[in-house]
Image (cartoon, rainbow, N blue to C red):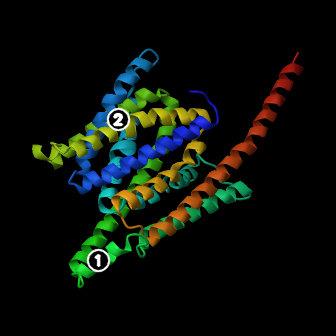
Amino acid sequence: MGSGGFLPVVVMVALNVVAAVMVSLVKVAMDGGLDPLVLVTLQQLTAALFLGPIAFFRERKSRPKMTMEIFAYLFTSAALGAALRQYMNFVALRYTTATFVTAFSNLAPVLTFLLAAVTRSETLNLRTGTGRAKLAGTLVSLAGAMVLTFYKGVPLTHTHLHHSASAAAASPSPLSAAESGRRWTLGTVAILGNCVCLSCWYLLHGRLAKKYPYVYSCNAFMSTFSFLQVAAIGLCAKRSLAAWLITSKFQILTVLYAGIVACGVSFVLLTWCIEKRGPVFVAAFIPVVQIIVCVIDFTILHESLYLGSVLGSVFVIGGLYLLLWGKRQEAMQQLPKVSENDREQQQQVQLQP
């Protein structure tokens, strides 16, 4: 692949289509009875089997021996970045809608920035315009998350289905209304936990990449460790063999797609895009998933789109791009300073006898 300007854009759009399709497949599969714990276990197993041979043949000669420090980093990274994060994501999809989950997921880069600022691995200078832009983007995104959490609003699409359901249950029992609210709240808490786990994983993985810069081996180990983690919990929670047997062709397709395509192939392409254009370029495409999922929800799954999801999404995405703009401008301002320092060092070397 060349490093031309258009090819990474095509790859990122394709990756977002892959992610949107996975979200929709998982939503339908779980509505059909597939358990989230079983799904994440089989997904990580499939990803480990796919990435393992690639890591072995590409990095077997350069990969160093495993140390206890690296093992601890990989094990914790697997728990945060794969096991817990994916399980919470699937639970959120089970109890809410695909559009709501993808809208809330846009908050992950903002939470990452907040955690980085608290741990002082990210600078926040409010005296500069870029610093104020990053803070404003963070606050706007958090406001959008509050709207998503506490305001559902009226349905904007498929309102005839909504009215039909209301007419069929002219006097719904308080128990059913309370149960619906409880499930939505549980899904909201789950997707918020997903964003927190992902943000912590971003910071942890940044340190791991410096200590163990072997991307294929790193992710193969993470998939293996996360499989063992969720499998241990799953076997304790679901001791019946019937819960682990998947007979539906659609559910089998979902597991294979989620493991091989959404985890394995997507990781390889995402790594290439980060190498070519940087993490800010990749993060700028995050909201594209929501747009594609919204189209699939509306046209294929016939899910209702609520006013709260639209308003919250506008705030979250707007704040995200404001934050990314501030980070981009800050990085561009630092480049000339680095060049000046290099020139000064070269002049000092030349002046030395």
Q: Residue shown at 41%/35% (left/top)? A: 73
- Tell me which amino acid carries mark 2: Ile
**Which label's residue is closer to the chain start, 1 or 2?**
1
Q: Quadrant of the C terminus?
A: top right
- Left/right placement of residue 209 relative to residue 52 reads right
Q: Residue shown at 45%/46% (left/top)? A: 17
Between circles 1 and 2, the one closer to the viewer is 1
Rendered position, 74 above or below 191: above
Q: Residue shown at 63%/57% (left/top)? A: 322
- Left/right placement of residue 269 relative to residue 31 reads right
Nearest to the observer: residue 112 or residue 313: 313
Q: Residues within 10 Å of mark 1 (few under 14, many from 20)?
A: few
- Tell me which amino acid carries mark 1: Ser
Q: Residue shown at 55%/53% (left/top)? A: 118
Q: Quadrant of the N terminus?
A: top right
- Left/right placement of residue 241 relative to residue 339 reads left
Give x and y (percent) for residue 308.
46, 71
Q: Residues within 10 Å of mark 2 (few under 14, many from 20)?
A: many
Rendered position, 308 above or below 173: above
Q: Which residue is mark 2?
A: 260
Nearest to the observer: residue 280 or residue 170: 170
Report the Cα–Cα distance between label 1 and label 2.
40 Å
Which secondary structure, mark 2? Answer: helix
Q: Which residue is mark 1?
A: 164
Q: Are marks 1 and 2 in contact (CB under 8 Å)?
A: no
